[in-house]
Image (cartoon, grey):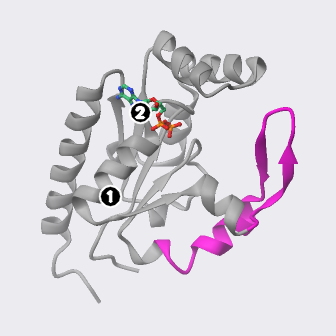
């Protein structure tokens, strides 16, 4: 299906700044912010609650079924700490946010993450697990890595993505079936 508006994934380790980026980007562009965590919870796309990790056990098939009537039409910003389950045909840009471990530690500590979950997320950021996942799941030319250390990074990143959206629209205008 051809789209008149792009779909963008904003991914990265929890605490890296996905929600902050998605909210500002949605406000500035009118694209719709889809918090996958919220959808998993609201639409029951899970097999229950993991008490140790304090998170839902996601049922990926249910999640994809629930998104497939909306997302392929375009105009969505998908906000999640995973990306490789989304079909390549749905996605035009994958933004992987990165931050320093000390900053991530402070942000997750402020959220009262259980120690084990906090350490696993720090390891995941250091090992650039999400970047590798994005590179394995999507064409290299649609995967971008951006720093999210300071508030000024957030503003700069959103401006950059807005410019990318404008170019995408120019490149894709007149392609509708
Ligand atoms: P995520 O959605 O990836 O878990 P959030 O957007 O909820 O991350 O951000 C986690 C915390 O870090 C929030 O308190 C937010 O204000 C802060 N934060 C996010 N991005 C930045 C940034 N680029 N610079 C400084 N603080 C940030």
Q: Position of residue 170 (x, y in %)?
A: 12, 67
Tell me if the residue at label 2 has its CB under 8 Å from ligand 1.
Answer: yes
Residue at the (69%, 16%) spot, across then down: 119
Q: Which residues are magenta?
A: 44-71
In the depicted view, which residue is nearer to us: 64 or 157?
A: 157
Please state, as top left, top right, bottom left or bottom right, where the C terminus lies in the image.
bottom left
The mark lying in front, picked from 1 and 2, is 1
Q: Is residue 12 left or right of residue 7?
A: right
The number of callouts visible is: 2
Secondary structure type for disc 1: helix
Image quarter for ligand 1: top left
Pointer 1 residue: 26
Secondary structure type for disc 2: strand
Q: Position of residue 55 (x, y in %)?
A: 75, 43
Quick one: label 1, few (<14), some, or many (20+) residues within 10 Å? some
Q: Which mark is residue 97?
A: 2
């Amino acid at each position: 299906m051809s789209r008149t508006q792009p779909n963008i994934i904003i991914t990265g380790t929890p605490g890296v700044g996905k929600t902050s980026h998605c909210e500002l980007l949605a406000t500035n562009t009118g694209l719709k912010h889809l918090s996958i965590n919220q959808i998993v919870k609201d639409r029951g796309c899970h097999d229950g609650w993991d008490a140790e990790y304090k998170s839902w056990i996601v049922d990926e098939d249910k999640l994809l079924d629930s998104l497939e009537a909306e997302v392929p039409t375009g105009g969505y910003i998908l906000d999640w700490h995973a990306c490789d389950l989304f079909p390549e045909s749905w996605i035009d840009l994958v933004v992987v946010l990165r931050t320093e471990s000390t900053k991530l530690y402070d942000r997750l500590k402020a959220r009262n993450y259980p120690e084990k979950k906090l350490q696993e997320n720090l390891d995941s950021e250091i090992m650039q697990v999400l970047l590798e996942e994005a590179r394995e799941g999507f064409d290299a030319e649609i995967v971008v890595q951006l720093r999210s250390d300071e508030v000024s990074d957030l503003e700069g990143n959103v401006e950059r993505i807005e410019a990318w959206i404008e170019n995408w629209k120019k490149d894709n205008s007149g392609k509708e079936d």
